[in-house]
Image: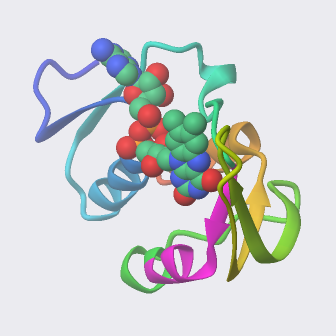
């Protein structure tokens, strides 16, 4: 393993994985450090809703693929928010729910394909 890198990223969440992929594509040597085991990369307690604009932006800017059919659970037209004190609101918001573990593994695979991913 190299002893020096252009960039060291701590944390293989969506941000770290996306950044590692972009840096790798730009030929920067990158070390990505994650405290979880590889098989658990992506797993996180989350509402799981993901808007289309964000991933479209990632695709346009960095060629990061949209969540694949395995990662996408459900397409939604409305998001319903409620709280313990009975506050409730529905917002028209086109998005989809994703399986975060599967999406994380998809991003991880993409980094490995770019051959800049070290673990
Ligand atoms: C309850 C909840 C619900 C949410 N619902 C939604 C939603 O519906 N839609 C939405 O878009 N967003 C939602 N979010 C926000 C979303 O989860 C975050 O915006 C997103 O995960 C941030 O990505 P990230 O890569 O910056 O960080 P993270 O996903 O938190 O990833 C950080 C990574 O760093 C690792 N790490 C941390 N410390 C270290 C260390 N010292 N050494 C090595 N590795 C380390 C962690 O294990 C993790 O893998 C929700 C968040 C919470 C908490």
Reply above or below: 53 against 106: below
Q: Is residue 70 left or right of residue 30?
A: right
Looking at the picture, the colour scheme in use is rainbow
Residue 72 placement (x, y as % from top left):
82, 61
What residue is drawn where x is 22% and y is 42%?
29
Q: Kindly give the residue lying farthest to the front in the view shown.
A: 85
Q: Is residue 2 left or right of residue 50?
A: left
Residue 2 placement (x, y as % from top left):
21, 22
Reply above or below: 43 against 71: above
What residue is drawn where x is 77% and y is 59%?
97
What residue is drawn where x is 59% and y is 29%?
41
| Quarter of the figure with residue 37 | top right
The magenta stretch spans which residues? 48-57
Reply above or below: 42 against 52: above
Residue 68 placement (x, y as % from top left):
78, 64
Q: Quadrant of the N terminus?
A: top left
**Is the stretch drawn in magenta largely helix, strand or loop?**
helix
| Quarter of the figure with residue 33 | top left
| Quarter of the figure with residue 93 | bottom right
Q: Is residue 62 magenta?
A: no
Q: Is residue 55 left or right of residue 117?
A: right
Residue 4 placement (x, y as % from top left):
10, 26
What residue is drawn where x is 52% and y is 69%?
64
Q: Quadrant of the C terminus?
A: top left
Reply above or below: 72 against 35: below
């Amino acid at each position: 393993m190299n002893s020096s890198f252009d960039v060291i990223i701590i944390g293989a969440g969506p941000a770290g994985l996306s950044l590692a992929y972009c840096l790798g594509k730009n030929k920067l040597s990158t070390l990505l450090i994650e405290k979880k085991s590889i098989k658990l990369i992506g797993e996180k307690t989350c509402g799981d809703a993901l808007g289309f604009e964000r991933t479209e932006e990632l695709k346009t800017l960095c060629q990061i693929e949209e969540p694949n059919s395995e990662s996408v659970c459900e397409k939604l037209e409305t998001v319903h928010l409620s709280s313990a004190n009975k506050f409730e609101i529905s917002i028209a918001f086109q998005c989809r729910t994703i399986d975060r573990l599967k999406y994380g593994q998809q991003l991880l695979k993409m980094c490995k394909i770019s051959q800049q991913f070290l673990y």
